[in-house]
Image (cartoon, helix red, strand yellow):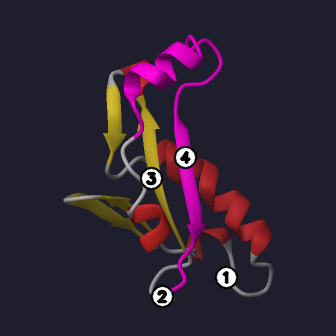
């Protein structure tokens, strides 16, 4: 998780300048948890919705679970059994 946690907060103005928000509502950055405490970790950014970073985002989790379930067949069990954490420096949350 250190790679994801150590990512600098992207510039909201640069993200908004790169896209108008008509198709992209948010960006999820995710990786397998190398420490093994969680199945995966992620961060969610949505400047198009006025959210620079959401420390615990349900939409980000809804997108990430099917992806990681496909990446870990037989390892993770049912997608609902995947555990993750949202890594937001100074804040964050856990989804199990």
Q: CA distance from mark 2 to mark 4?
A: 20 Å
User: Which numbered disc flags the more N-terminal residue, 2 or 4?
Assistant: 4
- Whichever of callouts 1 and 4 sits on the residue coming sooner in the sequence is 4
Helix, strand, or loop for circle 3? strand
Residue highlighted by disc 4: 28
Q: Position of residue 29 (x, y in %)?
A: 55, 52
**Mark 3 and mark 4 in contact (Cβ < 8 Å)?**
yes
Which residue position is annotated with label 3?
A: 43
In-front residue for pair 56/42: 42
Q: Secondary structure at mark 1?
A: loop
Q: Of the residues under marks 4 and 3, which one precedes in the sequence?
A: 4
* Label 4 residue SS: strand
2 vs 1, front mark:
2
Residue 6 seen by the camera = yes
First to last magenta residue range:
10-34
Whole-angstrom CA distance, mark 4 to mark 3, is: 6 Å
Residue linked to disc 1: 76
Instruction: Please name the residue that numbered disc 2 is placed on.
Output: 35
């Amino acid at each position: 998780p250190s790679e994801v946690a150590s990512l600098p907060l992207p510039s909201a103005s640069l993200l908004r300048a790169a896209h108008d928000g008509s198709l992209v509502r948010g960006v999820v950055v995710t990786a397998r948890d190398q420490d093994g405490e969680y199945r995966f970790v992620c961060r969610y950014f949505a400047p198009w919705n006025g959210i620079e970073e959401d420390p615990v985002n349900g939409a980000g989790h809804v997108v990430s679970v099917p992806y990681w379930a496909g990446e870990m067949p037989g390892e993770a069990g049912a997608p609902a059994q995947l555990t993750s954490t949202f890594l937001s420096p100074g804040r964050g949350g856990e989804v199990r």
